[in-house]
Image (cartoon, rainbow, N blue to C red):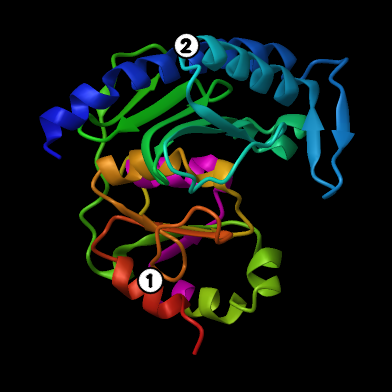
Amino acid sequence: MTSAASALDYSDDLAVALALAHEADLIAIDRYRAQDLDVQLKPDRSQVTDGDIRVERMIRDHLAQARPADAILGEEFGGGDPHAPGRQWILDPIDGTSNFVRGVPIWGLLLALVVDGVPQVGVVSAPALGRRWWGATGLGAWAEADGQPARRIRVSGVTDPADATLSYNSLKHWDEVGRLDQLVELSRRVGRTRAFGDLWSYMLLAEGAIDIAAEFDVKPWDIAALYPIVRQAGGTVTDVTGGDRLDTLSVVATNGALHPLVLETLSVR
């Protein structure tokens, strides 16, 4: 498929996703730091707020009208198989709910269109940061901040790991899957390590501000929207084995040049 064909295929879907992100931001920012915010624990002990519920319901209701033939998979109301054939929207209404509850501004909507198991459109919107990112096959990767004109984004050109910055998430999750030693080894090979966490790590990578981001215990709605943005920015994103599935509970994103080294270092030996 040519870039021109891809752009034609997904420009309308991207417009829908961006419109939904705008509405989602209005709902979520209204509930952020609200005194009457309702917070519940789900069976897996993770938190869910009335903001999560309201955003996902709004998106589902809108897509039922705008894209009635498409499937939907969301964190709060479930859905089907992320690798089912056909078109499927995958969303996390508020990625970083624990941050949202505690007043940490690193949270936001993750919304993706996945076609035959491949993420083709992704939008990440973080209203408390005043920032939004998006990407779609054939349309490039873009970012806007505080109402300024959108700018095209690109991953870094770093090739020497000694010059690279690595961002990881929970050390507990790395320990639980038996790869904490590998993470420590990788940290020794790179120039800097930080734990920016959640969506922020991957968007910094897509903008070229950092070079490697990786974590475990991720679900399809945590990562589907990241794939088109990172890839359209020139980066590489896979699971820890180098595969493309969304349901393996791991994600590794790099500027591309560093990807083989990162996968080799994180491999079980």
Q: Quadrant of residue 146?
A: top left
Residue in view at x 88 percent, y 33 percent: 40
Q: Quadrant of residue 113?
A: top left
Magenta stretch holds residue 201: yes
Q: Residues within 10 Å of mark 2 (few under 14, many from 20)?
A: few
Q: Is residue 71 above or below residue 169?
A: above
Magenta range is 186-206
Residue at which label 1 appears: 262
Q: Residue 4, position in %: x, y?
A: 11, 28
- Judged by depth in the image, the label closer to the viewer, 1 or 2, is 2
Residue at which label 2 appears: 66
User: Decide: marks 1, 2 in contact (CB < 8 A)?
Assistant: no
In the depicted view, which residue is nearer to us: 3 or 268? 3
Q: Callout 1: helix, strand or loop? A: helix
Q: Amino acid at mark 1?
A: Val
Question: Magenta segment, principal secondary structure?
Answer: helix
**Looking at the figure, which quarter contains the N terminus?**
top left
Residue in view at x 71 percent, y 35 percent: 97
Q: Is residue 186 above or below residue 167?
A: below
Q: Quadrant of residue 252?
A: bottom left
In the depicted view, which residue is nearer to us: 185 or 75? 75
Left or right of 11? Residue 15 is right
